[in-house]
Image (cartoon, rainbow, N blue to C red):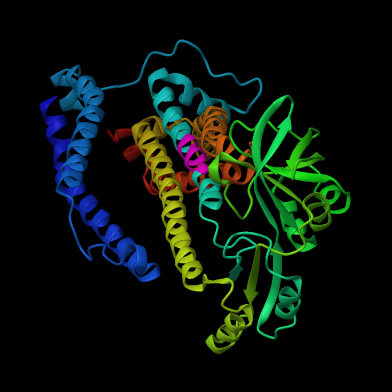
Amino acid sequence: MRLVRKEALRWCRFAIPVGITVGVVVIWILCAILRIVSPEYFGEMAVFGLSIPSIFAGIIMGLLTVLLASRSPAKKASKVSPLEAVSGNASGYQPVKKAANTKLFKVETALGIHHAKASKKNLILMVGSFALSIVLFLSFSVTVAFMNHALTPLRPWTADLSIISPDYSCSIGSELLERLQENSAVKSAYGRMFKYDVPVTVNGSRKKVDLISYEQRQFDWAKDYLLKGAVDEAAKKPNTALIVFEPGNTIQVGDTVMLDIGNRIQEIQIVGMLSISPFGNGNDAGIMICSEETFRQITGESGYTIIDIQLKKKATDEEVSAIKELAGVSCTFSDERMSNKSVIATYYCFWLFIYGFLVMIALITVFNVINSIAMSVAARTNQYGAFRAIGLSMRQLTKMVISEACTYTIIGSFIGTVLGLLCNKLLFRMVISSHWGDAWPLPLTELCIILLVMFLSVGLAVQNPMKKLRKMSIVDTISTL
């Protein structure tokens, strides 16, 4: 047993320094990219630094893994008699209790499946390792949806410039919006009317909402974030509105909301629910969105609270200054161009991290499959030689190895898919649905990617061991330990 453990530790002397070196290089490259892409957030990050606790943790984890992995073969080796060890006739095969089932498959295929199921312990370990890769990939893929919700620099309504009423009232005239829409540097300009903290009664309970108006362009953008109901109905039908999802929301699609505005009770029917909107709700107030016509009819206001402006790509600072002068000193002028660029850079940094981690999981899956299949073939080398000695062709032998590998992969893929989908659904509900109300979508793309990686890895894993078996004579194959 000591010899086996010493041999395993010798491999650690090589593997651990290589792993640390590769890890340090990858982290250094990642940090350099983060500093270049988003200097505002990552500019103070050290160009090069070592985490001693992380290195020691990796070394300890590697040593424990190797020692645990060597425990089983060490026990088997300790049971071999000296005479068998010297003669090379030590056999690690278990007695056959049940013959291979050749009714459904050809002999070589049936033998491959039989070999995969011969050792329950080996089957559980192989299937478990394959399934774990799928579970990790599907579970971590939820972070992609979270990133797309939490970091939103590229939403269609994102503005470069904003003109805001200083007292947040509807005091900006519609003529300013018309002049901005005619400006050659402006790609699009759109206004919103706000009425804050409006008391409402719905289903017998009272709360407050922020009433906000949309024009047709903004309603078209909202269609991509619709959870329930219909956006067009709120855009065209008077006295209707959309509600924005919030945890613990008591207002649902189909409810009739009673608004108390200016000592007058106004009724609005909720015809749709959105997952997100361009603005947050202050003071725990809900958000209701209606058409400009409905807003004017209910509140009696005709001006805008805010006008957002999206510039053309070639807009100059001089043109921005002209827009600022056009807004006048009576309004608050906000330039969000630098902030938008910074958020976009941060988004791509997180994109690099998340997709990089998914790629790492996929690579680990590839190496795991290739190594597992190679070890399985190596363990049966002399047995394959015996099959060749009794007349089995290399083509049949290849089918046997492929069927054994596919048995591990199919069972592991099935278990991993079931557990992975359950974990994906649970994490999606905890991270996404609870905050934005999105329904869980079946991650078909992610599932197809990881399953494709699994089966391509099996194809690659079989190639190298079979090449070695083809080059070896039958005598050498049988005598291989």
Q: In the figure, 316 relative to 361: above or below?
A: below
User: Which residue lies most toward the bottom here?
Assistant: 318
Asked whether 12 or 235 is in front, the reply is 235
Q: Quadrant of residue 186?
A: bottom right
Specify the quadrant that holds the N terminus. Answer: top left
Residue 251 in the image: x percent, y percent?
Answer: 70, 33
Asked whether 406 or 415 is in front, the reply is 415
Q: In the figure, 127 relative to 396: above or below?
A: above
Q: Quadrant of residue 283?
A: top right
Residue 393 visible in this rendered orientation of the protein: no
- The part of the chain drawn in magenta is 134-142
Q: In the figure, 463 relative to 399: above or below?
A: below
Q: In the figure, 25 relative to 182: above or below?
A: above
Q: Quadrant of residue 308?
A: bottom right
Identity of the residue drawn at 59% across and 53% down = 279
Residue 127 visible in this rendered orientation of the protein: yes
Count of numbered circles on the image? 0
Identity of the residue drawn at 59% across and 74% down = 330
Residue 361 in the image: x percent, y percent?
Answer: 42, 45
User: Which residue lies most toward the top here?
Assistant: 97
Specify the quadrant that holds the C terminus. Answer: top left
- Asked if the magenta segment contains residue 157, the reply would be no
Residue 317 in the image: x percent, y percent?
Answer: 53, 86
Q: Give the prevailing secondary structure in the magenta stretch.
A: helix
Asked whether 327 or 129 is in front, the reply is 327
In the visual, does 189 lie left or right of 448? Answer: right
